[in-house]
Image (cartoon, helix red, strand yellow):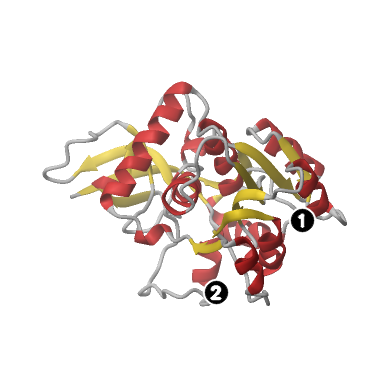
Amino acid sequence: MQVLIHVRACGVNPVETYIRSGSYARKPTLPYTPGSDVAGVVDAIGEGVTAVKAGDRVFTTATESGGYAEYAVAVDDCVHKLPDALDFTQGAAIGIPYFTAYRALVHKAHAKAGETVLIHGASGGVGVAACQLSRALGLRVLGTAGTPEGMKLALSSGAHLVYNHREEGYTDKIMEATEGWGVNVIVEMLSNVNLSKDLQLLAHGGRVTVVGSRGSIEINPRDTMAKESSIIGVALFFSTPEEKKECASLLFAGMEAGWLRPVVGPQYPLEKAVQAHHDIMESPGAAGKIVLTM
């Protein structure tokens, strides 16, 4: 059952640059239009669709036809109502970032209130979502960013303490903040740089969730033995319908309560999509979600 959406904004995710370059594990059939996180207005609904109607403001977690477009088709269970309090660019910053953060923290790391989480890359789309979600779940939140602007953003998104991951010795400061015990959960955006260090930052029984990686890295497996720790991959692609429903319910509560506040970073018109892809990979530090506007 499908929904046709008049697209007003579409989020840009790193995975789209990997798919476009041909370096991603799953190759799409061509011709291919990127974009899963659109926000816009329902133009028409297919037979049997009941959750939304023409004229509703909505956001998506996936599209059938691609979101870098003026119109997009999505399956109805990937279409969600967008509250009036959020604009379309914010709506385009929810899909992959918030559903990934929830999958990493809840379904994979089984994070519990009172635990300490390190968001390793807390100022991008997933990072901001993970900060807000972690606070709502009652975690103690440590974040890292690569610029002063990013650090400020992580703090305003709910991190209790923030560190500059470009500074020498920042990991020592993180260990100090935990009084030497280490952190219980790490949400890792750049595993090919940080994973070895992450294993040393974990508390006993700690879990690293691998959300992003741009290459390979050497680790010492003994580091996992010393802490009985786990390294867990996160891929939204494998979410079951039940998991999606559960996540959507919590995110709706967050929108109603006001703690789910997507932070939009640089905005580009649709024809500048190539520039947006360059910038999401090459920027010195993220500050909010990169969004295309139609």
Name above or below for residue 43 compared with residue 22.
above
Dot 1 amino acid type: Pro
Percent across and percent down for residue 256 are: 42, 23
Q: CA distance from mark 2 to mark 1?
A: 21 Å
Identity of the residue drawn at 46% across and 38% down: 91
139 vs 163, nearest the viewer: 139
Q: Position of residue 89 (x, y in %)?
A: 52, 38
Res. 220 mark: none
Whether residue 274 sits left or right of residue 137 in the image: it is right
Residue at mark 1? 284
Between 172 and 159, the one lying in front of the other is: 172
Q: Nearer the viewer, residue 172 or 164?
A: 172
- Under tag 2, what secondary structure? helix
Q: Is residue 168 above or below residue 225?
A: above
Q: Quadrant of residue 287?
A: top right
Residue 286 lies left or right of residue 184; in this view the side is right
Residue reaching furthest left? Answer: 48
Disc 2 target residue: 21
Q: Residues within 10 Å of mark 1 (few under 14, many from 20)?
A: few
Secondary structure of residue under mark 1: loop
Please rate how many residues cluster around mark 2, counting C-alpha atoms within 10 Å: few if below 14, some from 14 to 19, many from 20: few
Residue 53's spot in the image, x, y percent? 22, 33
Instruction: Tell me the amino acid under the disc marked 2.
Output: Ser
> Left or right: 30 with respect to 23?
left
Q: Position of residue 224 (x, y in %)?
A: 61, 67
Mark closer to the observer (2, 1): 1
Can the viewer see residue 274?
yes
- Residue 41: in sight, yes or no? no
